[in-house]
Image (cartoon, coloured by chain):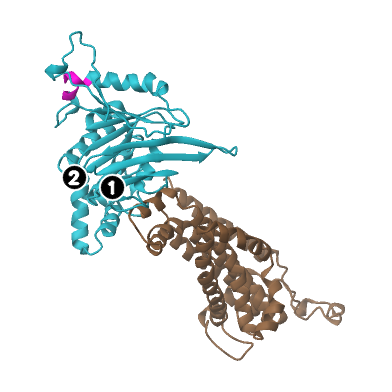
Chain colours: A brown, B cyan
């Protein structure tokens, strides 16, 4: 029987996963039961449970427990993983939507006008390499609200790839297509929406995809700083609780959500793609 | 009578990159009558495409004017349809949508069904119907893409149709088929066509008149050759016509040697007008005794 490429790849992935989990499971030294210890060992405190990296079986148990009731809310320090992720996604999407609302029109302007490009380029070049978290103290002082500051940090980190890609895509629209619009007497607004936007869409969506990836990376760090709610806060809180099982579980959840966000933009990217 | 399209003292200069200017052509004058099919032949670099872009309104001449129906041309307009060499179809739209896009721009008050039926009708005229019209341009062959482009231009009923080497990128067989289709569509209309080409046989098959350009810089529209072969013309039959080789030889001779010799000089202040050349071996008054082609030059 000949397996297709995808089938073979799936089998290999599964094998790697199983081997990895098994190595992890068996490389964790088992805790000795207190009854097997010598008196000296018991006096030295070795009978107490030692903190250690948990084996995957415990992580699965935790995941099952958390995912079976993701939206429970038992006070500020004990909320379900669904609620925490919900807060993070809400912050990411708010900051991201604000950034898109500014970056895409501004990118259009920069892409269509060489003067605007040259005038704004120095500012972009200085502001772009700033680590988004460096804005946090200033944001906290000016905005005076930790929630809004986190959103601002997402805004500032996701604006640059969208701005630059939009400008690049718009500036690179083939002159022939613009000439088609001109010979059909389309006004500037109709040209922008019916010719330039679809022509530049693949580049713009690539920028949006990069931005959402960065935003998801940054939200974890931002929430560790501002605290209160969100998946970043959850990771840090579980670290403070020395609950490594929960830490590992939430790390996995961060990866899964990031993958879903990226896949959503992948779908969008395929929808706007065209072959010349 | 006023001509339909009149090009008056058209001059185009570009900076030559060394602080000076390069004159592509100077004081070009020529006319196109309504319903005429005019081809312009010349070597690369003589400014054919520049003239085309000026006629389309996509470029501004350094000086001179283009008048259509007595009004000066400024900027692009739906009255002047353009078929570009590289088809210029919008790749994210289907074939049909590429045509309805243009029809909607031309007739904004038409209903959706009317726009659709009109587009389908013109696509059908170039031999595209059925599933093909829902494909994207990237799924079509070069010849089919150019057919779409021609359908798009004809569907808009422009007063003047500009064809910029429309068959330049096609193989010889496809080119022949589409030339025939172009003739078929055109013969049913009063469409005025101005076309750039490199291909002598194509020009003879299609045109009422061929404008010959000398080499650039300082190119001139030197001659206007009437094609004295009656329509309807069929590719396989026109070669039998007594005028075919006489005209063809004249054109080959012009492009081969005279285009260089006649190249303009700097500082030509007087307007350059093409000489009208009429070669007709079927006309008894012109019947040559020795069989050499007779050139009768008429200045106007």
Dot 1 alpha-carbon crowd within 10 angstroms: few under 14, some 14 to 19, many 20 or more: many
Could you say where residue A98 lies in the image, as x and y percent from the top left? 53, 74
Answer with the quarter of the image where residue B145 lies: top left
Name the residue at 19% across, 54% down. B118
The residue at the point 34 percent across, 57 percent down is: A185
Labels in figure, total? 2
> Same chain, marks 2 and 1?
yes
Mark pair 2, 1: CA separation: 28 Å
Q: Earlier in the sequence, mark 2 or mark 1?
A: 1
Compared to A225, does B103 lie above or below? above
| Residue B44 in which image quadrant | top left
Residue interval drawn in magenta: B237-244
Looking at the image, can residue A59 be seen? no
> Does residue B155 appear in this view?
yes
According to the picture, the residue beneath numbered tag 2 turns out to be: B125
Classify mark 2: helix, strand or loop.
helix
Q: Which residue is mark 1?
A: B68
* Residue B122 x/y as whole percent: 20, 49
Residue A165 lies left or right of residue B191; in this view the side is right
**What chain does mark 2 sit on?**
B
SS for tag 1?
Answer: strand
Q: Toward the viewer: B159 or A189?
A: B159
Q: Main secondary structure of the magenta part?
A: helix
User: Which residue appears at 13% of the width and 20% of the height?
Assistant: B283
Label 1: chain letter: B
**Left or right: where does residue B130 sit relative to residue A160?**
left
- The quadrant the C terminus of chain B occupies is top left
Please say whether residue B195 is one of the residues in the magenta stretch. Answer: no
Q: Which quadrant would the N terminus of chain B be assigned to in this image?
A: top left
């Amino acid at each position: 029987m000949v397996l297709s490429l995808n089938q073979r790849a799936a089998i290999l992935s599964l094998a790697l996963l199983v081997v990895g989990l098994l190595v992890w499971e068996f490389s964790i030294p088992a805790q000795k039961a207190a009854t097997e210890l010598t008196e000296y060992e018991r006096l030295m405190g070795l009978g107490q449970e030692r903190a250690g990296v948990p084996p995957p079986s415990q992580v699965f148990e935790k995941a099952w427990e958390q995912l079976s009731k993701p939206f429970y809310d038992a006070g500020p320090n004990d909320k379900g993983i669904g609620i925490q992720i919900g807060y993070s996604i809400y912050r990411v999407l708010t900051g991201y939507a604000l950034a898109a609302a500014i970056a895409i029109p501004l990118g259009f302007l920069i892409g269509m006008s060489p003067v605007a490009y040259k005038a704004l380029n120095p500012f972009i070049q200085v502001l772009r390499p700033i680590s988004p978290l460096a804005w946090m103290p200033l944001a906290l002082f000016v905005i005076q609200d930790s929630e809004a500051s986190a959103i601002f940090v997402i805004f500032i980190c996701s604006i640059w790839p969208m701005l630059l890609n939009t400008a690049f895509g718009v500036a690179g629209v083939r002159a022939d297509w613009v000439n088609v619009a001109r010979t059909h007497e389309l006004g500037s607004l109709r040209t922008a929406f019916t010719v330039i936007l679809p022509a530049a869409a693949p580049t713009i969506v690539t920028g949006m995809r990069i931005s959402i990836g960065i935003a998801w990376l940054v939200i974890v760090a931002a929430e560790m700083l501002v605290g209160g709610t969100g998946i970043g806060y959850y990771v840090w809180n579980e670290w403070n609780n020395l609950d490594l099982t929960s830490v590992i579980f939430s790390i996995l959840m961060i990866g899964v959500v990031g993958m879903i966000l990226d896949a959503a933009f992948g779908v969008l990217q395929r929808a706007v793609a065209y072959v010349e | 009578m006023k001509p339909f399209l009149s090009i008056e003292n058209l001059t185009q200069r570009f900076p030559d990159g060394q602080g000076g200017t390069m004159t592509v052509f100077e004081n070009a004058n020529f006319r196109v009558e309504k319903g005429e099919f005019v081809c312009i032949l010349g070597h690369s670099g003589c400014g054919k495409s520049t003239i085309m872009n000026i006629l389309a309104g996509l470029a501004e001449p350094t000086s001179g004017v283009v008048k259509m129906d007595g009004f000066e041309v400024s900027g692009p307009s739906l009255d002047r349809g353009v078929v570009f060499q590289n088809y210029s179809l919008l790749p994210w739209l289907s074939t049909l949508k590429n045509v309805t896009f243009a029809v909607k721009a031309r007739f904004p008050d038409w209903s959706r069904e009317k726009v659709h039926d009109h587009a389908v009708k013109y696509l059908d005229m170039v031999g595209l119907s059925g599933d093909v019209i829902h494909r994207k341009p990237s799924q079509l062959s070069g010849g089919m893409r150019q057919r779409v482009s021609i359908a798009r231009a004809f569907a808009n009923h422009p007063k003047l149709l500009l064809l910029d080497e429309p068959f330049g990128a096609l193989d010889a067989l496809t080119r022949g088929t589409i030339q025939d289709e172009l003739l078929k569509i055109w013969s049913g209309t009063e469409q005025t066509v101005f076309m750039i080409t490199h291909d002598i046989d194509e020009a003879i098959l299609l045109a009422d008149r061929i404008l010959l350009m000398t080499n650039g810089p300082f190119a001139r529209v030197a001659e206007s050759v009437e094609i004295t072969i009656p329509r309807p013309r069929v590719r396989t039959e026109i070669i039998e016509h007594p005028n075919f080789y006489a005209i063809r030889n004249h054109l080959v001779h012009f492009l081969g040697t005279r285009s260089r010799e006649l190249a303009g000089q700097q500082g030509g202040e007087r307007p350059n007008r093409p000489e009208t050349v009429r070669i007709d071996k079927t006309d008894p008054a012109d019947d040559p005794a020795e069989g050499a082609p007779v050139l009768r030059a008429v200045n106007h």
